[in-house]
Amino acid sequence: MYLVHARLRTVPPVEVPDDLREAARAGLSPRDRVEHLAVHPQSAEHFTLGFYLLSDSLQEAERHAEAVCRRLLGARALPAARLLDVGVPLMPLSLLEHRSH
């Protein structure tokens, strides 16, 4: 299982709706293989979707999260938004160094 973040910005800039998580989850289907979906508002018009996906590889998980996100945008399960980037969040090096001591 992989956690993949998709960062988005509403277009035109509008406030992220309060029911975004429920609306996005309602747009998912079993074939999406999304085990959990988290929504993280970043600012009034920026938000991140956190997809916990079943996948065979990191690259496949990232491609799959992007495809699901684009489908949700096309189906209007999400507010009108531009997909800024998709990727696995990286752990800061300082945390890795701290864990090794």
Image (cartoon, helix red, strand yellow):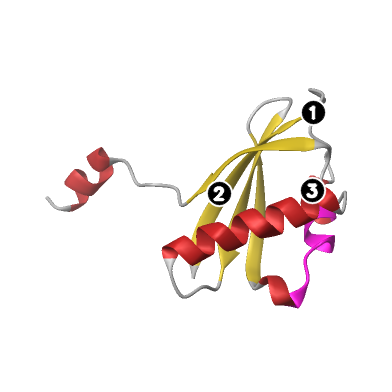
Query: Which residue, given by chain and number where applicable, does mark 2 sit on?
Result: 5
Q: Residue at x 80, y 46 (%)?
A: 20
Task: Please identify the dominant SS of the magenta region.
Answer: helix
Residue at the disc numbered 1: 11
Q: Which residue is located at x 62 percent, y 54 percent? A: 66
Secondary structure under tag 3 reads: helix
Q: Residues within 10 Å of mark 1 (few under 14, many from 20)?
A: few
Q: Earlier in the sequence, mark 3 or mark 2?
A: 2
Q: Is residue 40 magenta?
A: no
Neighbours of disc 2 within 10 Å: few (<14), some (14-19), many (20+): many
Horizontal side of residue 49 vs 25, given as left or right: left
Q: In this figure, which residue is indicated by the disc labeled 3?
A: 73
The kind of residue tagged 3 is: Leu
Q: Position of residue 75 (x, y in %)?
A: 87, 54
Checking the image for residue 2, the label placed there is none
Q: Amino acid at mark 1?
A: Val
Numbered range of the magenta stretch: 23-30
Marks 2/1 in contact by CB < 8 Å: the verdict is no
Kind of residue at disc 2: His
- Whole-angstrom CA distance, mark 3 to mark 1, is 12 Å
Question: x and y percent of residue 12 in the render?
Answer: 82, 24
Q: Mark 3 or 2, which is nearer the eye?
A: 3
